[in-house]
Image: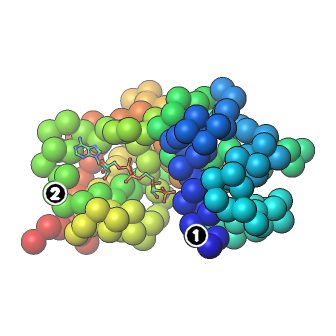
Amino acid sequence: MSKDLSKFLSLILRHEPAKFGVVLDSGGWTPIDVLIERIRASGFRDLDRAMLDAVVENNNKKRFTVSGDGLRIRAAQGHSVEVDLGLTPNQPPAVLYHGTAVTNLESIKNKGLLPGNRQHVHLSSDRDTAVSVGTRYGKPIVLSVAAGSMFEDGIQFFQAENGVWLTDSVASKYMDVDQMEKPD
Ligand code: HQG
């Protein structure tokens, strides 16, 4: 139930707010009381504020952020709808990781890492996270990204509220197949 609700929240807050009668402001925020009404109307009839708070609190990737006044909520990252998260550019660690499927490798080598439907390319500071992200699409492969070099070259990075690193794209020259994950 809470996993289903978490997935549904991601769908509404990242991808299809309008389909569920939810309006996000320019920063991706929406009032929690209205959101609860909309989610109830979509089938989670028992949902109340305490249940929503529990999903936010227990979410394994801290995908959702509640505003300081407790009135609004947004997805911390991962949007396909256009929002401006208002994050301050930040210096990344020297190396970040991106997990993907082996089948994407050739295209990534040719075109670099692109954000696809989302607003940013997503990178993590630990390779375990990258492995699990890549596993979603099949046999995973981990790319190490020379984020420090990119930063020195003037490319901006942002860190979302849940720790995920975001950047617009990653050119091939900054990437390497992680040694521990060479394809067969
Ligand atoms: C791939 C999850 C071919 C890219 C995770 C990825 C993340 C290319 C896919 C968050 C490519 C896009 C985002 C190119 C990129 N050619 N394939 N040139 N450039 N790709 O889901 O990073 O659980 O939009 O490698 O933890 O997989 O949803 O991005 O495989 O943080 O909270 O195109 O989603 O978080 O897929 O995942 P996605 P992602 P949540």
Q: Which image quadrant for residue 110?
A: top left
**Residue name at image x 34 percent, y 49 percent:** 145
Badge 1 local density, few (<14 within 10 Å), some, or many (20+)?
few
**Residue name at image x 38 percent, y 56 percent:** 97
Residue closest to the eye, 61 or 111: 61
Residue receiving disc 2: 103
Q: Sequence order check: which comes first, mark 1 or mark 2?
A: 1
**Residue name at image x 19 percent, y 61 percent:** 102
From mark 1 to mark 2, how far is it between C-alphas? Answer: 28 Å
Q: Is residue 130 above or below residue 9?
A: below
Badge 2 local density, few (<14 within 10 Å), some, or many (20+)?
some
**43 relative position to 140: left or right:** right
Q: Which image quadrant for residue 140?
A: bottom left
**Looking at the rendering, in which quadrant would you find the N terminus?**
bottom right
**Any part of residue 112 in sight:** yes
Q: Given the image, on which type of amino acid does mark 2 rest?
A: Thr
Front of the two marks 1 and 2: 1
Residue 29 spot, x, y in % from top left: 71, 37
> Furthest-left residue in view?
184
Residue closest to the eye, 55 or 146: 55
**Any part of residue 157 in sight:** no
**Looking at the rendering, in which quadrant would you find the C terminus?**
bottom left
**Residue name at image x 64 percent, y 59 percent:** 43
Q: Can you tell me whether the CB of the residue at mark 2 lies under 8 Å from the nearest atom of ligand 1?
A: no
Q: Is residue 146 above or below residue 1?
A: above
Residue 76 spot, x, y in % from top left: 62, 47
Q: Can you tell me whether the CB of the residue at mark 1 lies under 8 Å from the nearest atom of ligand 1?
A: no
Residue 136 spot, x, y in % from top left: 34, 65
Residue receiving disc 1: 3
Residue 3 spot, x, y in % from top left: 58, 70
Residue closest to the eye, 149 or 131: 131
| SS for callout 2 | helix
